[in-house]
Image: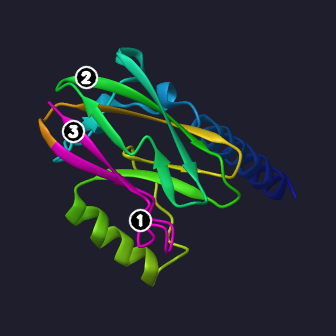
Amino acid sequence: MKSLTWTCAVALLVSAGAVHAHGDKKDPAKLFDPASAEQQPFGIAGDPKKATRTMTIAMSDKMHFMPSVLTIRKGETVRFVVRNEGNLLHELVLGTEEELTKHAEQMRKFPDMEHDEPHMVHVKPGNAGDLVWTFNRAGEFDFACLVGGHYEAGMKGRIIVK
């Protein structure tokens, strides 16, 4: 009986930690780990404490972003506040056009696929989410909503890094 009690106590402690960790995912400052930040063709996960600008992007059920074109200086760390003003789940995913197209195809094949990368934020209707990114490479990059059918409906935007 003692071992059953001990096993239950350990299971509760472990699950309490997991619940707490899941809650921390909403705070980018607690999520940022420079050691695990991976360089992408369009930049690298940014340290929220080093954000030099905040940009708000609205998403709607009309399948568009406002604004849909952003100009950012090379080297700038931007905090995006992404607001979902619609009644459907939306997301903002940073990437190149090629990567986003491939990802959208995967989402069509596996609509319940879960993913959580630093260059994407999923936002439930009526809510907002944060994404912090450092644009350390010049060029033109893209962002899109890859929820099934949204990308195909034109829910995408462009980022120009000068």
| Real-space Cα separation, disc 2 to disc 1, in angstroms | 27 Å
Number of other residues with Cα within 10 Å of mark 2, as a class: few under 14, some 14 to 19, many 20 or more: some
As drawn, 28 above or below 149: above
Where does residue 81 sit, x and y in percent of width and height? 52, 33
Tell me the residue that label 3 is attached to: 160
Label located before the other in sequence (2 or 1): 2
Q: Which residues are magenta?
A: 140-162
- 133 or 35, which lies in front? 133
Query: Under tag 3, what secondary structure?
Result: strand
| Real-space Cα separation, disc 1 to disc 3, in angstroms | 18 Å
Identify the residue at horizontal 82%, vertical 58% (top origin).
4
Tell me the residue that label 1 is attached to: 154
- Residue 112: give its label: none
Query: Under tag 2, what secondary structure?
Result: strand
Question: Hey, what amino acid is under mark 3?
Answer: Ile
Number of other residues with Cα within 10 Å of mark 1, as a class: few under 14, some 14 to 19, many 20 or more: some
Q: Is residue 61 magenta?
A: no
Question: Hey, what amino acid is under mark 1?
Answer: Gly
Question: Hey, what amino acid is under mark 2?
Answer: Glu
On the picture, is 137 further left or further right than 78? left
Tell me the residue that label 2 is attached to: 76
- 44 or 9, which lies in front? 44
Label located before the other in sequence (1 or 3): 1
Where does residue 58 sit, x and y in percent of width and height? 54, 42
